[in-house]
Image: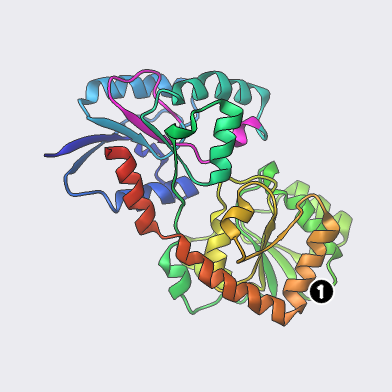
């Protein structure tokens, strides 16, 4: 018997959520008939829950699934959503925080199941939003096999440390710049960051005297990302808060050592496969950079441990467990 699943596919695209959506859809069971939300409404629109409710009512679907946090305002069928993190409560405007607490959280409690991507995020959902822990299922993201299979590396004009991600406040990029400037490593080494030049970061680099050692890579094509990780000396991902932290796994799979944080979900995801440091302590971050660049024994230890760690994170498992949550 076929099951009709209405899916909020507006989240498809070149993002972490977009990757999750695609991996889940690639593993859709044969008896599932998928239908999709048809709307050009902004993902973060205040009216999204109402649009979703109307779409559900007219869809005649058996269940609704979203790969992200936006629940319907009303639903006559069971629904499953994925809340990746609670960044809106910490790093967005006060209006975002109120909307998340008073609207999103209340609607989410009506879900059949809430999926989240780490036990840290599950703990936050129960403690900060008061969601029943029995409603929440933790399903880890996976890492694409092409990172481990790739044997090519990009060579920039100089050896480089790498950061891949956006520029939101939780990413802690100014602190990483300060730690990089302080680290006792070869001054030929540069810090390469995804994205276009940023006036604030350029000003910070100039203040630190490292403007010639910073390189902005612009938009990174998906097909070149494995080669970029492979070519780096170290991947820097010393965030203040993450729900998961996919670049950690992508770097581990590429056999490039990772410097990450010892807070939020990051030590949970990294395990023993990355060097975890205090993201609020510039000296500790700088020492971590020095050790991973200069200490070959330590460097090789984290490369080997990281290679073992990625076995825990398989998209096949993510897809199977997600469909189990949707259809059960």
Q: Which residues are magenta?
A: 70-89
Which residue is under mark 1?
A: 185
Residue at the (51%, 41%) spot, across then down: 84
Q: Furthest residue to the left?
A: 1
| SS at circle 1 | loop
**Which image quarter holds the C terminus?**
top left
Residue at the (44%, 57%) spot, across then down: 142
- x and y, in percent, of residue 151 in the image: 48, 79
Front residue of 80 and 175: 80
Q: Is residue 210 visible?
A: no
- x and y, in percent, of residue 238 in the image: 70, 55
Q: Furthest residue to the bottom?
A: 296
Determine whether, in the image, residue 207 is placed left or right of residue 272.
right
Determine whether, in the image, residue 94 is placed left or right of residue 99.
right
- x and y, in percent, of residue 307 in the image: 53, 72
At label 1, counting other C-alpha atoms closer than 10 Å, the crowd grade (few under 14, some 14-19, many 20 or more) is some
Q: Is residue 71 magenta?
A: yes
Q: Quadrant of residue 115?
A: top left
Q: Is residue 269 magenta?
A: no
Residue at the (49%, 49%) spot, across then down: 16
Determine whether, in the image, residue 7 is placed left or right of residue 307.
left
**Main SS of residues in magenta:** loop
Q: Is residue 322 above or below residue 316?
A: above
- x and y, in percent, of residue 303 in the image: 60, 74
Figure label count = 1
Residue at the (35%, 45%) spot, across then down: 322
Q: Is residue 195 above or below residue 250?
A: above
Q: Is residue 8 above or below residue 74?
A: below
């Amino acid at each position: 018997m076929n099951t009709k699943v209405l899916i909020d596919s507006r989240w498809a695209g070149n993002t972490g959520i977009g990757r999750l959506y695609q991996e889940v859809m690639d593993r859709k069971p044969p008896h599932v008939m998928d239908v999709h939300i048809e709307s050009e409404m902004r993902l973060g629109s205040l009216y999204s829950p109402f649009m979703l409710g109307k779409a559900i009512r007219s869809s005649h679907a058996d269940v609704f699934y979203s790969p992200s946090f936006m629940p319907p305002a009303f639903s006559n069928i069971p629904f499953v959503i994925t809340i990746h993190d609670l960044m809106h409560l910490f790093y967005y405007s006060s209006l975002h925080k109120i909307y998340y607490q008073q609207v999103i959280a209340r609607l989410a409690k009506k879900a059949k199941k809430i999926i989240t991507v780490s036990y840290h995020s599950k703990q936050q959902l129960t403690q900060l939003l008061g969601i029943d822990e029995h409603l929440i299922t933790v399903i880890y993201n996976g890492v694409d096999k092409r990172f481990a299979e790739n044997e090519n590396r990009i060579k920039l004009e100089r050896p480089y440390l790498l950061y891949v991600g956006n520029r939101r406040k939780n990413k802690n990029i100014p602190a990483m710049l300060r730690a990089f400037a302080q680290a006792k490593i070869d001054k030929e080494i540069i810090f390469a960051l995804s994205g276009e030049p940023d006036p604030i970061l350029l000003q910070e680099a100039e203040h630190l005297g490292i403007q010639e050692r910073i390189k902005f890579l612009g938009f990174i094509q998906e097909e070149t990302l494995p080669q970029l990780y492979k070519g780096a000396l170290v991947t820097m991902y010393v965030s203040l808060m993450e729900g998961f932290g996919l670049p950690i796994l992508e770097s581990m799979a590429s056999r490039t050592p990772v410097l990450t944080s010892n807070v939020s979900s990051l030590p949970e995801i990294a395990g023993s496969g990355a060097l975890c440091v205090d993201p609020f302590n510039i000296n500790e971050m700088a020492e971590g950079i020095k050790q991973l660049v200069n200490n070959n024994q330590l460097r090789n230890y984290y490369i080997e441990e990281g290679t073992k760690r990625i076995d825990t994170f398989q998209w096949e498992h993510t897809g199977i467990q997600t469909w189990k949550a949707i259809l059960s």
